Structure formats: structure tokens, C-alpha cells
């Protein structure tokens, strides 16, 4: 006998309520969905926000590096980058060491969109943390950092520290302000 729609079959049982991965995933999905819904009336897609966010955080990236950070395949990113380049938000330049690679950089024309993204992000962050005390926010940050450290290998952690150092250097030199 087939289960009725919406009924959980014994084959697919799992204790989701006690799964840290489930908690993080459904929270991330809700956050991203809300962010995307709030960006849409501004004429900005979630993928465009991700591109500008990663460029603000890491500076110049190849298309493959950018796609990896966004968890999509490089060909899936092409259309997004085409539209952003047509709008003057990004520039693609060939890599001198490897002609198959293209460097992606943010352009000054992206600043108005970035300001809207940052403002939208700040409002969402305020909503998401409404009612939290500073101590609770510090605890949340600590706990999530510990989860990330527990599931991340040492090489990725070292890379993250390098990215943070690059970010500080870019902020000092005035490259596209992150504001997150």
C-alpha cells in the first residue's frame, strides 16, 4: 500500500528535530528566501547580490572561484555575469597566466546596487536578531563558529584567515565597501 501524500514513509524516517544540519539548513533557506524577496523590488537578484558580496569580501575572483563560493557550476553563472557586465557592475578580464580563466572584478557602477543590498541586509539582520541580547548574539556567533570549525578542514580555515587579511587591506585602500 502506498503512503498518502505528505505521509513520511518508514524508509525515509529521520530525527530532523535533533539534527543540527537541519536547523542550520532551514534557517539559511528562510534567510536567503527573505533576502531574495526583499531584493526583487529593487531590481537585484539574489545571485547578483552573491556576486557583489563575494567580490566585496574577497576582491578579484575567477569565474570558477566565484561559482564555487556560490555553490553553482561555472556555466550557470555565465548569464548572471553577462547581465551584470552589461549593466557595468562587473568587468571580466583575461588571466595572463591561463587564458581559459577570466578575472571578475566589481566596477564603480555597482556601488548604488551594493548600497541597496547592504541596507536590505542590515534590515534583515535587525529583524533576524530582534529580541536577542548582546550576550545571546555573542553566544550565537560563538556556537556557529564552532560548528563551522568542526566541519571545516584546517586548510579551508587557513584560507579563510588569508581572505580576512585581504579584506582588511582592501577596506584600508577603499575598494568596494562590504558593509555586512
Image: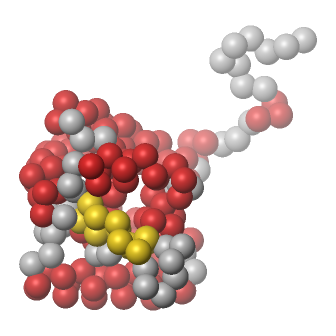
* 11 horizontally vs 125: left or right: right
The residue shown at (30%, 82%) is 164
Number of residue marks: 0
- Give me the residue at 78% from left, 26% from top: 9
> Who is closer to the viewer here, 162 or 135?
162
Q: Is residue 116 above or below residue 40?
A: below
Colour mode of the rendering: secondary structure
| 47 to 56, vertically: above or below | above
Q: Whole-percent x and y of residue 157? A: 46, 83
Q: Which residue is painted at 25% across and 33% down in the image?
A: 40
Q: Position of residue 46 (x, y in %)?
A: 33, 44
Q: Quadrant of residue 155?
A: bottom right
**Is 131 left or right of 2, judged from the image as shown?**
left
Residue 93 appears anywhere in the view: yes
Q: Residue at x 72, y 25 (%)?
A: 8
Question: The N terminus lies in which quarter of the figure?
Answer: top right
Question: Does residue 90 lie above or below 131 as drawn?
Answer: below
User: Which image quarter is the C terminus in?
Assistant: bottom left
Q: Residue at the right extreme?
A: 1
Q: Is residue 142 visible?
A: no
Residue 6 on image: x %, y %: 66, 18
Front residue of 62/116: it is 62
Q: Is residue 175 left or right of residue 94?
A: left
Amino acid at each position: 500500500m502506498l503512503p498518502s501524500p505528505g505521509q513520511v514513509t518508514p524508509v525515509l524516517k529521520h530525527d530532523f528535530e535533533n539534527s543540527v544540519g537541519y536547523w542550520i539548513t532551514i534557517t539559511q533557506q528562510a534567510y536567503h528566501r527573505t533576502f531574495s524577496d526583499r531584493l526583487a523590488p529593487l531590481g537585484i537578484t539574489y545571485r547578483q547580490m552573491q556576486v557583489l558580496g563575494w567580490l566585496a569580501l574577497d576582491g578579484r575572483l575567477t569565474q570558477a572561484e566565484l561559482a564555487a563560493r556560490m555553490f553553482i557550476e561555472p556555466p550557470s553563472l555565465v548569464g548572471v555575469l553577462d547581465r551584470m557586465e552589461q549593466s557595468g557592475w562587473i568587468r571580466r578580464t583575461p588571466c595572463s597566466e591561463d587564458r581559459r580563466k577570466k578575472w571578475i572584478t566589481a566596477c564603480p557602477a555597482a556601488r548604488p546596487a551594493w548600497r541597496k543590498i547592504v541596507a536590505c541586509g542590515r534590515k534583515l539582520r535587525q529583524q533576524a536578531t530582534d529580541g536577542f541580547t548582546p550576550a545571546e548574539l555573542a553566544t550565537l556567533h560563538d556556537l556557529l563558529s564552532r560548528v563551522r570549525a568542526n566541519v571545516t578542514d584546517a586548510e579551508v580555515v587557513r584560507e579563510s584567515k588569508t581572505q580576512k587579511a585581504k579584506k582588511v587591506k582592501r577596506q584600508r585602500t577603499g575598494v568596494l565597501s562590504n558593509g555586512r
